[in-house]
Amino acid sequence: MDPPKVSIIFPIYKKSKYLENNIQKILEDPYPNDLKEIIISIDSPEDDFLNKLLELKNKYKNIILIISKDRRGKVSATNDAVKISSGEILFFFDADIIIDYININGIIEELKEYDIIEFYKEIIKKGWLGYLMFIEFSSYFDIIDPILNKTKKPLFLNGSGFATKKSVWNAVDGYSKVYVEDVDFAMKAGKKGYTYHMSKNVKILIEPLKSLRQWIEQRKRWSFGFIEVILNHLDYMIDFFMRNMLIALLIILILYLPYIIWTYIYIYLPVSFLYQIAIDIYKSLSNSISFIYLIILSPSSIFKIFNILYLTLLYIIITSSYIYILISIRRKKLYNFLPFILFSILYIPLYEIVIIYDIIYYGIFERAPKMNWKV
């Protein structure tokens, strides 16, 4: 049987820092270059980058350009590219990714068994935000996704890098105009019985976002996108978890084990020593401050403050250590422990606040918050 033609699609907005290097990486892969079709679908290209694209097209004959002066958005840019593609197999890469490793033939072999292949992804540990994003992505791609992999059914999908059969793409009508088009695509495919696999035949590196503001905007989009997914595909999600009850319970246990341990300690560990500390502090203060303050600052109020601090510190230590141990064991490497503390004390609560904000906003206005994202 002849090897299939592959269409490799890059939807881009304005410019892509790593496009030329990624194209070089793709063409260096031993899969026959005459069976590789690279389609670059770009919105509002910057002049310098457009000139670079034209140079690349002249240099590599298997590059096809789709240029739009207006901003169509990733969904339309990708759908337009697929419409003119001639490959049986579709590869999708975002503009801001770095292809660290690619084995096209390995992906094609996996597509004989599966319908959607997600590529392994890792955030580059650049700056404090990059390190925290690295922990988040590693928690998913090294711990959660390998468990979901056992179901062979799509649930989530990170669209910055994946492959599928063109027949699958056409059967589900490609990307829909929603905020998380990749997850929506996975759900639509799952409803039609298509299968999923996460592969390390392609490894993608992703640059972290440059600022906390960008991170909040991205998480607002992801959070609202998840609300959309629930509204559109709740039936599939319920069916998925009912059919994979043990795996679902295992994932819930992995995610919430720190909370379970923290709750157990909170209920059963004696805290009388904190009250004794509060009494000692009160006695010490009574010798040095005015009795007016002592009326307000009772032993019980001091105990409450220490109890809150104690429980907060306990949560941070348990959660940080738990995530650190899981990732270190899974990746067989030791890391700086401080970012894991920041992940527990800052990253997780901030993400939860963004999710709550989106839920409240939708509950009041029944629409998404304003975002710099075109679908």
Image (tube, rainbow, N blue to C red):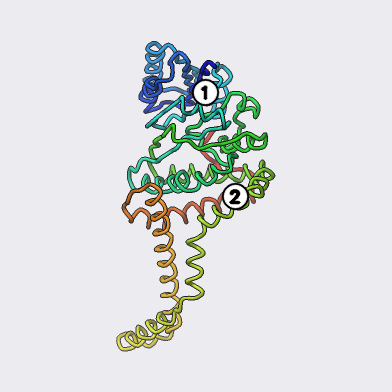
The residue beneath circle 2 is 361
**94 above or below 327?**
above
Residue at (47, 21) in percent of width and height: 40
**53 above or below 150?**
above
Q: Which mark is residue 70?
A: 1
Q: How many numbered marks appear?
A: 2
Q: Nearer the viewer, residue 311 or 368?
A: 311
Tell me which amino acid carries mark 2: Tyr
**163 above or below 239?**
above
Disc 1 crowd rating (10 Å Cα; few below 14, some 14-19, many 20+) is: few
Q: Which mark is residue 255?
A: none
Tell me which amino acid carries mark 1: Asp
The x and y percentages for residue 181 are 57, 35
For marks 2 and 1 on the same chain, the one whose residue lies earlier in the sequence: 1
The x and y percentages for residue 146 are 50, 44
The x and y percentages for residue 122 are 40, 40
Residue at the limit of the structure toward the right, as seen here: 235
Res 18 → quadrant: top left
Residue at (39, 59) in percent of width and height: 321
In the picture provided, is 372 more to the left or to the right than 194? Answer: left
